[in-house]
Amino acid sequence: MSKLTGKVAVVTGASKGIGAAIAKALAAQGASVVVNYASSKAGADSVVAAITAAGGKAVAVGGDVSRAADAQGIIDAAVETYGRLDILVNNSGVYEFAQIEEITEEHFHKHFNVNVLGLLLTTQAAVKHLGEGGSIVNVSSVVTRLTPPGSAVYTGTKGAVDGITGVLARELGPRKIRVNSVNPGMIATEGTHSAGIVGSDLEQWAISTTPLGRIGQPDEVADVAVFLASDDSRWMTGETLIASGGAR
């Protein structure tokens, strides 16, 4: 039996990149998955098609996690479709770099609304349904250790995610719900390609500071998320697992 057979998972921001890889990996281990998307229905439908073609179960559900009604709707869709909720992966996120002179109110709120408020709203909706053995996996970033120039706002959001992970682990521990985060290094995704990061000097810098000598792939983060979602990590909560090829 696969390690997540009978479980139901919600993965936010799962239409591409790390989120899509996590959704596919959870489904491959037997979970029924809600593939959330904010704007790319086609991307989410493609992820669902890949999961179902492989014999898994998944549905695509639209919603902006930074809006309370949408966050609730995403969770409600999981319960209405599959009858329960066991796993929440808070993966939705945005990132744009800006030097301190370039930071605007819009830049700040765009990042904190999705990366931090969205995580809180979706978790708030989910904990009504998560029971003993439930697992929340937050996708943070190794930028909290690297603190690269030009990333004050983005790194600030991920520092908040790490802090929230610890707080919620303590709050939800008495209910036997675990909360952990996976903190990826630079990953080759649609986002890093479209942003011009892959193939840039920034990628070369990341490779030069990574002991394993390359950037990561989405499935390498997804495998860590599966570990945190499953009973393999049943004695772990409040942890931040860095998946960065050794970059610190």
Image: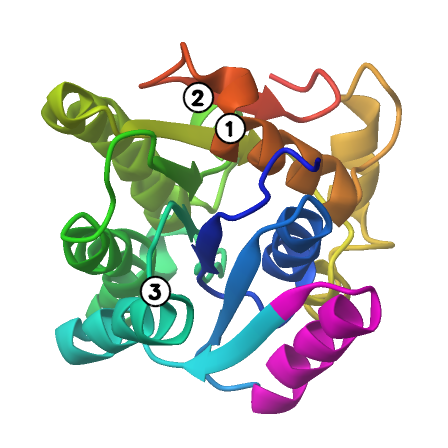
What's the mark number on residue 240?
A: 2
Identify the residue at horizontal 16%, vertical 25% (top origin).
167
Q: Residue furthest top?
A: 235
Q: Mark 2 is on which residue type?
A: Thr
Mark 2 surroundings within 10 Å by alpha-carbon count, few (fewer than 14), some (14 through 19), many (20 or more):
many
Which three-letter amino acid code belongs to the residue tagged 1? Leu
Is 43 covered by the magenta stretch?
yes
Q: Which residues are magenta?
A: 41-57
The residue labelled by disc 3 is: 83
Nearer to me, 177 or 141: 177
Query: Residue at 87% of width from left, 54% of height from top?
Result: 199
Q: Quadrant of residue 104?
A: bottom left
Q: Position of residue 143 (x, y in %)?
A: 50, 33
Residue at which label 1 appears: 228
Q: Quadrant of the C terminus?
A: top right
Q: Which badge, 3 or 1, is on the more N-terminal residue?
A: 3
